[in-house]
Image: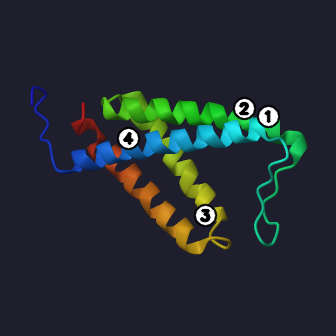
Amino acid sequence: MPNGTNVTGWVGWVYFAGVLLILRGISEAFLGITALVNKHYLFTTSNNTLVVSANNMSAWGWVQLAIGVLVLAVGFSVLHGSTWARIVAVLFAGGAFLVNMAFLGIFPVWAIVAMAVDALIIYALVVHGGEVA
């Protein structure tokens, strides 16, 4: 490598993190579009733990759509080795980790799996993200 950095097998995990961010961005954007198109769409669990009122759906939809577009752009930038994208991706994965902690009581298996993937993304980007550049 021209910059003297040894490339390890973790570069594949960094690319994996970038692809996951792209998929997550698409998913988040679709959630935002759904909220904008169907204002009576409610998210609930069997115990009505999480409810989004119809009055707030437009604002929530726009925020969700903006987050989706941002995460999508970050995912593509991570694949290109951008430093700013790694920082934003780590912040997003850290936030997602904390949000998944809130869902441990509702969806324990999914929350644990999602938290493990978030931790793997953070590790790959922080420790080995520079190898992609």
Give, as a three-letter code, the residue at label 2: Trp
Please report contact status of discs 4 and 3: CB closer than 8 Å, yes or no: no
**Which label lies toward us, 3 or 2?**
2
Q: Determine the CA span between mark 1 and mark 2.
A: 5 Å
**Please, which residue is most extreme toward the top here?**
2
How many marks do you count on the picture? 4
Q: Determine the CA span between mark 3 and mark 1.
A: 25 Å
Quadrant location, the N terminus: top left
Q: Dot 2, how many residues are within 10 Å of its Cα: few (below 14), some (14-19), or many (20+)?
A: some
Q: Determine the CA span between mark 1 and mark 4.
A: 28 Å
Say what secondary structure mark 4 lies in.
Answer: helix
**Which label lies toward us, 4 or 3?**
4
Please report contact status of discs 1 and 4: CB closer than 8 Å, yes or no: no
Q: Earlier in the sequence, mark 1 or mark 4?
A: 4
Query: Is residue 126 visible to us here?
Result: no
The residue wearing badge 2 is 62
Quadrant location, the C terminus: top left
Residue 59 is labelled as 1
Front in this rendered view, residue 31 or 94: 31
Name the residue: 76% across, 36% down.
37
Residue 18 is labelled as 4
Which of the 4 quarters of the picture holds residue 34? top right
**Which label lies toward us, 3 or 1?**
1
Give, as a three-letter code, the residue at label 3: Met
Front in this rendered view, residue 85 or 52: 52
Q: Determine the CA span between mark 2 and mark 4.
A: 23 Å
Q: Determine the CA span between mark 3 and mark 2.
A: 25 Å
